């Protein structure tokens, strides 16, 4: 299923859903990803100033692929 990420809040929600699907707490996720629990909380709540590199690392660690493509490109 494709989820278009329109803003940080969308990414945070997707990460929260995946974390819960995997049965992880925020603390477990933070430990697994090498971040702090506060970072996971802020990411999931859509804080606009979270570090993109860390957010990307969390997504990848949880099994979320981030794919960028041009809108309107059906190929």
Image (spheres, rainbow, N blue to C red):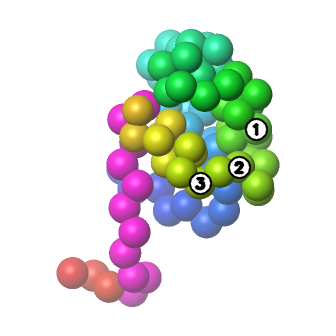
Residue drawn at x 59%, y 22% is 30
Point out the tag, 2 or 1, that comes first from the N-terminus: 1
> Considering depth in this image, is 19 or 60 the residue closer to the camera?
60
> Considering depth in this image, is 32 or 74 the residue closer to the camera?
32
Residue drawn at x 50%, y 62% is 4
Q: Position of residue 28 (x, y in %)?
A: 56, 13
Q: Position of residue 21 (x, y in %)?
A: 48, 22
Q: Secondary structure at mark 1?
A: helix
Q: Are the residues at dot 3 and dot 2 in contact (C-beta closer than 8 Å)?
A: yes
How far apart are the alpha carbons under marks 2 and 1?
7 Å
Label placed on residue 60: none
Few, some or many residues within 10 Å of mark 2 (<14, 14–19, 20+): some
Q: Which residue is mark 3?
A: 52
Q: Quadrant of residue 45?
A: top right
Q: Is residue 66 visible?
A: yes
**Which span is picked out in magenta?**
62-72
Q: Secondary structure at mark 3?
A: helix
> Considering depth in this image, is 60 or 12 the residue closer to the camera?
60
Q: Is residue 75 left or right of residue 19?
A: left
Q: Secondary structure at mark 2?
A: loop
Asked if 37 appears above or below 16 in the picture, the reply is: above
Few, some or many residues within 10 Å of mark 3 (<14, 14–19, 20+): few
Is 4 part of what is drawn in magenta? no
Residue drawn at x 36%, y 48% is 65
Q: Which residue is mark 2?
A: 50
Q: Is residue 65 left or right of residue 54?
A: left
Q: Is residue 20 left or right of residue 8?
A: left
Residue drawn at x 64%, y 44% is 12
How far apart are the alpha carbons under marks 3 and 1?
12 Å
Q: Are the residues at dot 2 and dot 1 in contact (C-beta closer than 8 Å)?
A: yes
């Amino acid at each position: 299923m494709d989820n278009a990420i329109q803003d940080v809040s969308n990414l945070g929600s997707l990460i929260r859903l995946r974390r819960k699907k995997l049965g992880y707490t925020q603390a477990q996720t933070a430990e697994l990803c090498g971040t702090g629990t506060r970072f996971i909380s802020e990411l999931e709540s859509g804080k606009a100033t979270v570090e993109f590199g860390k957010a990307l690392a969390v997504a990848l660690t949880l099994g979320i692929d981030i794919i960028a493509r041009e809108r309107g490109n059906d190929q």
